[in-house]
Image (tube, rainbow, N blue to C red):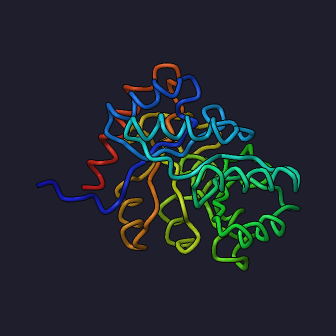
Amino acid sequence: MLKKEFLQTGMAGYSFVNYTIDQTISIMNRVGISNLSVKDFHLPLNSSRQTIDEVLSMFSNGGIHVYTVGVIYMKTEGEVDRAFEYAKRVGVNMIVGVPGYDLLSYTEKKVKEYNIRIAIHNHGPEDKLYPGPKDVYDRISKMDSRVGLCLDIGHALRAGAKPEKAVTDYASRIFDLHIKDVTAAKADAKAIEVGRGAIDFPALIAALRKIQYKGLCSIEFEKDMKDALPGIAESAGYLRGVMS
């Protein structure tokens, strides 16, 4: 009998921007990953109840569990409202999102109203709002405990933050992980298969075990996005190897 992994894997929906829902399900089944953060190109924010039910049924019938939605960008209060109502209708308890600085207090209000967590995503040096995890944490550390981070480890390294240190420094606020590798700890580093790049995955997994991380480790594959299966399979295999 196989021992259950302490850390659970998932997929970030952006990995499948060039694929249909059926193709996404097929790829995930082939690599043995069953948890998905769904993106709006597969399930639009303005979807009807019927569309939501149909899409969720497609994933469920294919053995895929939609555990969160996003990344969702929010530039107005109306867009915050729409994101939380969308998450409620989809039936998830977390949004991976990017609200502007001026919307953080309003977002916290919605977190309390809906009892849905927000995991704010860092997007690297090009991101004027949240380049690294500290840029998120410093703005939310005194907010409701349901306001946290989606730590994108590749973008974090490009922004000068070691992912394993971010995990321990911001442990209580890390709700989700986007797992990728990059060619170097530099701003202009490129995406590469997990295990081939500059991220210290043994140190990262050790840090996650130390903090008893309960969220998902979701691979976001951004290299060969029109021929993603080989890279996703290699990344998943390497990640599972380090986890075990």
Q: Position of residue 205 (x, y in %)?
A: 37, 60
Image height of 56 relative to 135, above or below: above
> Toward the viewer: 156 or 50?
50
How many numbered dots are placed on residues in this image? 0
Q: Is residue 141 left or right of residue 158?
A: right
Q: Is residue 69 left or right of residue 46?
A: left
Image quadrant holding the C terminus, namely bottom left
Q: Is residue 104 left or right of residue 230?
A: right
- For this orientation, the residue located farthest to the left is 1
Q: Could you tell me which residue is drawn at 37 percent across and 40 percent down?
A: 63
Q: Could you tell me which residue is drawn at 40 percent across and 26 percent down?
A: 229
Q: Could you tell me which residue is drawn at 58 percent across and 61 percent down?
A: 93
Image height of 197 relative to 242, above or below: above
Image height of 140 relative to 75, above or below: below
Q: Position of residue 149 (x, y in %)?
A: 62, 62
> Toward the viewer: 130 or 189?
130
Image quadrant holding the N terminus, namely bottom left
> Toward the viewer: 236 or 70?
70
Q: Is residue 231 left or right of residue 104?
A: left
- For this orientation, the residue located farthest to the top is 226
Does any portion of residue 183 appear in the rendered image? Answer: no
- For this orientation, the residue located farthest to the bottom is 142
Q: Position of residue 117 (x, y in %)?
A: 63, 65
Q: Could you tell me which residue is drawn at 80 percent across and 55 percent down?
A: 80
Does any portion of residue 76 appear in the rendered image? Answer: yes
- For this orientation, the residue located farthest to the front is 50
